[in-house]
Image (spheres, coloured by chain):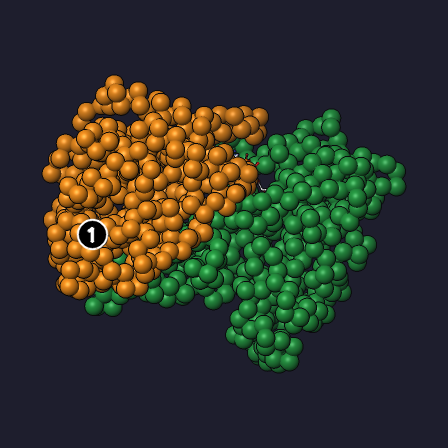
């Protein structure tokens, strides 16, 4: 496994400094308190565009900077530390990947440049139930002459209110549960018959539920081959899982730092509480877990960059491991802070709420343990 | 108060009859809907009717002496009242509407109070009409409670209080507060503390609600600026507050063991039903997510172990359970089970378990996320998880105390 390159290390530093100074958790709190429906601050997103971050995964001839998955993950980790809200992961990460993997020349030319500079937002509409189960997709797309008619609903779509278009997973044949018969469509958000409704969630981000009522799209909206959408979908989801794991590592790492700081500074019984071994040992164990998680997160992103055949397995590993660590860490963040951790004025609650939303996104720990076992062949 | 079988069965008949006549049926099964964590829902006027009747009968505080307004029942009789309430969906709202009066302050007054203090304070608690809060914690005195700085001066005919408390649950709505104060600055920390009962309805006490991560503001910063307490409202002796205060904490713990909370009425089996609804069953009738299934089973086993331990302690004490260090074991087990349950519920509901507001989420889903968040406090208040473990190590296991006192 390779260490970060000099370029990646520099970008990591840049992202860390920028997030801390320009888009800190206090800014996210402001956005939350203002009740902004989209869940992110426009200025923050524009600034990211100017720095070229939305183009990290996109080839240069489409307006991107083509720096790869690990580089993208490094930025996400630093943004995760400050809970910086933006469509970077959902659009420039997952949306762009779907189009890169499945889009033809026309579709790529139409969408990638806008995704690369952040002027357009495309997000994946996959889940139909509260728990992630991509193969259970039932949303129907029926052929009608030269077009397809979509009916059904998608729930909890990330950045669903601000998206300009959706990559929609549908079933064109086969039974729920089957890999065959899934098809992806690129559907503009203003298509007739498509309506969306924003959700107010504990993590205060911009999710929406989508309703498709006889939404008619031309053949050219098909992303990849008819009935064969699953291979693109699965690779897209894996990239998304690796990105989420990177963000989760950042959220957890910041939670760890806050806790460590508190253990050193909070005095009870005339000594810093970190001197109590009951707490000190737990901090040591969390640190150990964090180091393990980092290895998994970086390995998965690196495998995606290398086109490694083990990438899928590593993506499930990193999503699961990051989920476990973040779950544990977010609970310890509250517990070790005592009463102050329970107050809304302190940031711990924001991290805790974000932690569970990230854990549940694109498959929780149990989902990925199961998938890991399947990929290992047992 | 005879506890032989026949008399107990006769008593069961009486209890049944009284409840049938007095418990308003509109409240049946409404305990969790009415006694919400954030605030009591008083929209149904029958709640007040029920509080009055229960208070009059003394069965809100069933084992307290009848001469001060309690029920005067034995523990076995009280258990019967509980069982008969459970059977018809009735519940005891007084444990909530009296704040910490019933679970903590009352038992301590009964133990340490003067005759006059008992007569003045206990009947009002039994009626469920006086809300008590508890002023222990300060910004720099949490787990290390003995470091508290809030002080009371003897002004001849009254006590004068100055200083700050924090995390005071219900301070803003309380009528009375039990405050730990420093009354002697020149002795060892634990030897200069006293317990004072103070009337909260005075302008020299300021309360500032603090918002919690679950959204509501059930606790406050509390400031005493020349606040006055009656001279005869010190509970226990001057500078004996550490003993009184610790005793009260044992009562608090006892109330948080899960033992006296009506067994968590009606929520135990629903976990299974909710899991079936959100996760579904496979063709063999097993929960479709086998990973979740085994963790759910593990949780239910832990919950059962906790319940069985409570039952065993009650049985071994022959219906006369004493407040003891064992409460620490039960409190830690109870908070682990409760918090784990909330995490599992959230996981079962997936994204729907993370809704905050709005009609896209069911009332049950919205309650789940708030309960999950507010439940994180269970292992912090009343002596944190770690402090309980210190107590177990020292008081039960007899391990030597080192620098890590608690
Ligand atoms: C919802 C809620 C309601 C509350 N209501 C009240 C109330 O009504 N009245 C009142 O007076 N107080 C109340 N409290 C305060 C509560 O009692 C304190 O929060 C608690 O005692 C912990 O103190 P602290 O917050 O200062 O944390 P600290 O004591 O600073 O503890 C921080 C962390 O260090 C750990 N720690 C501390 N000492 C040791 C040790 N020796 N060994 C190992 N670990 C240690 C703690 O367990 C915790 O994890 C409430 C708190 C909450 C969250």
Whether residue B252 is visible here, answered yes or no, is: yes
- Of residues B394 and A172, the one nearer the viewer is A172
Q: Position of residue B374 (x, y in %)?
A: 51, 49
Residue A357 position (above or below residue A51): below
The local crowd at label 1, few if under 14, some if 14 to 19, many if 20 or more residues have their Cα within 10 Å, is: some
Which chain is assigned green? B
Residue at the spot 15% in from the left edge and 41% down from the top edge: A105
Residue placed at 37% from the left, 66% from the top?
Answer: B273
- Seen in the image, is B103 located left or right of residue A49? right
Q: Mark 1 — residue?
A: A221
Reply above or below: B56 against B368: below
Q: Is residue A298 visible?
A: no
Q: Quadrant of the N terminus of chain B?
A: bottom right
Image spot of residue B179 (x, y percent): 71, 43
Q: Position of residue A150 (x, y in %)?
A: 25, 61
The answer to whether B134 appears left or right of B120 in the picture is left
The residue at the far top in this view is A6
Q: How many marks?
A: 1
Q: Secondary structure at mark 1?
A: helix
Report the chain shown in orange: A
The quarter of the rendered structure image containing the C terminus of chain B is: top right
> Which residue: 40% across, 25% down?
A18
- Residue B121, percent from left and from top: 76, 56
Q: Chain of mark 1?
A: A
| Ligand 1 quadrant in view | top right
């Amino acid at each position: 496994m390779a260490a970060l390159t000099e370029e990646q290390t520099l970008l990591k530093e840049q992202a860390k400094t920028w997030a801390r100074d320009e888009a800190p958790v206090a800014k996210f709190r402001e956005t939350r308190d203002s009740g902004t429906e989209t869940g992110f601050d426009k200025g923050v997103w524009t600034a990211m565009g100017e720095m070229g971050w939305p183009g990290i995964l996109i080839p240069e001839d489409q307006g991107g900077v083509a720096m790869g998955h690990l580089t993208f993950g490094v930025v996400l980790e630093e943004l995760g530390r400050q809970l910086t809200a933006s469509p970077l992961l959902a659009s420039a990460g997952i949306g762009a990947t779907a189009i890169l993997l499945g889009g033809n020349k026309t579709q790529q030319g139409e969408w990638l440049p806008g995704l690369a500079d952040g002027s357009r937002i495309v997000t994946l509409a996959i889940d139909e139930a509260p728990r992630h189960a991509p193969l259970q997709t039932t949303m129907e797309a029926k052929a009608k002459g030269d077009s397809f008619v979509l009916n059904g609903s998608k729930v909890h779509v990330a950045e669903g209110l601000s998206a300009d278009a959706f990559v929609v997973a549908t079933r064109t044949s086969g039974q729920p549960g089957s890999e065959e018969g899934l098809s992806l469509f690129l559907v503009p958000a203003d298509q007739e018959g498509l309506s969306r409704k924003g959700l107010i969630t504990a993590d205060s981000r911009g999710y929406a539920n989508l309703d498709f009522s006889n939404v008619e799209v031309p053949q050219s909206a098909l992303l990849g081959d008819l009935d064969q959408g699953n291979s693109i979908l699965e690779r897209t989801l894996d990239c998304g899982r690796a990105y989420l794991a990177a963000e989760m590592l950042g959220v957890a790492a910041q939670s760890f730092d806050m806790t460590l700081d508190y253990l050193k500074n909070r005095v009870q019984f005339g000594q810093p509480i970190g001197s109590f071994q009951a707490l000190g040992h737990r901090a040591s164990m969390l640190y150990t877990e964090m180091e393990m998680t980092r290895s998994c997160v970086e390995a998965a992103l690196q495998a995606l960059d290398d086109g490694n055949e083990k990438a899928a397995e590593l993506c499930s590993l990193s999503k699961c491991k990051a989920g476990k660590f973040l779950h544990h860490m977010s609970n310890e963040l509250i517990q070790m802070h005592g009463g102050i951790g329970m107050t809304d004025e302190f940031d711990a609650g924001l991290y805790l709420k974000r932690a569970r939303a990230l854990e549940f996104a694109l498959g929780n720990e149990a989902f990925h343990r199961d998938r890991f076992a399947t990929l290992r062949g047992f | 108060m005879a506890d032989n079988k026949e008399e107990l069965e006769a008593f069961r008949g009486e209890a049944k009859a009284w409840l049938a006549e007095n418990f308003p049926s509109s409240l049946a099964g409404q305990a969790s809907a009415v006694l919400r964590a954030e605030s009591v829902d008083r929209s149904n006027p029958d709640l007040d009717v029920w509080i009055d009747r229960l208070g009059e009968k003394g069965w809100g505080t069933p084992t307290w002496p009848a001469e001060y307004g309690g029920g005067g029942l034995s523990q076995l009789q009280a258990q019967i009242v509980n069982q008969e309430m459970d059977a018809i969906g009735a519940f005891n709202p007084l444990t909530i509407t009296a704040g910490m009066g019933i679970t903590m302050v009352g038992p301590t007054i009964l133990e340490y109070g003067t005759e006059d203090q008992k007569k003045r304070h206990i009947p009002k608690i039994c009626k469920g009409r006086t809300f008590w809060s508890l002023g222990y914690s300060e910004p720099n005195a949490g787990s290390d409670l003995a470091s508290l700085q809030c002080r009371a001066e003897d002004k001849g005919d009254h006590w004068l209080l100055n200083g700050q408390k924090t995390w005071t649950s219900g301070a803003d709505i309380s009528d009375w507060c039990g405050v730990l104060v420093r009354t002697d600055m020149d002795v060892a920390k634990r030897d200069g503390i006293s317990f004072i009962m103070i009337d909260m309805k005075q302008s020299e006490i300021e309360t500032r609600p603090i918002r919690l991560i679950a959204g509501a503001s059930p606790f406050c910063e509390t400031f005493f600026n020349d606040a006055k307490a009656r001279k005869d409202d010190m509970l226990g002796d001057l500078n004996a507050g550490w003993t009184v205060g610790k005793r009260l904490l044992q009562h608090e713990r006892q109330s948080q063991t899960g033992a006296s909370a009506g067994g968590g009425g009606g929520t135990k089996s629903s976990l299974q039903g909710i899991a079936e609804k959100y996760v579904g069953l496979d063709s063999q009738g097993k929960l479709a997510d086998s990973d979740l299934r085994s963790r759910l089973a593990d949780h239910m086993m832990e919950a059962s172990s906790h319940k069985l331990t409570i039952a065993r302690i009650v049985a071994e004490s022959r219906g006369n359970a004493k407040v003891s260090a064992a409460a620490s074991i039960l409190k830690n087990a109870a908070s682990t089970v409760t918090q784990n349950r909330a995490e599992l519920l959230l996981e079962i509901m997936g994204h729907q378990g993370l809704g905050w507001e709005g009609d896209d989420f069911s009332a049950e889903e919205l309650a789940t996320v708030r309960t999950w968040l507010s439940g994180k406090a269970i292992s912090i208040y009343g002596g944190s998880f770690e402090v309980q473990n210190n107590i177990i190590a020292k008081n039960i296991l007899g391990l030597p105390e080192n620098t890590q006192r608690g």
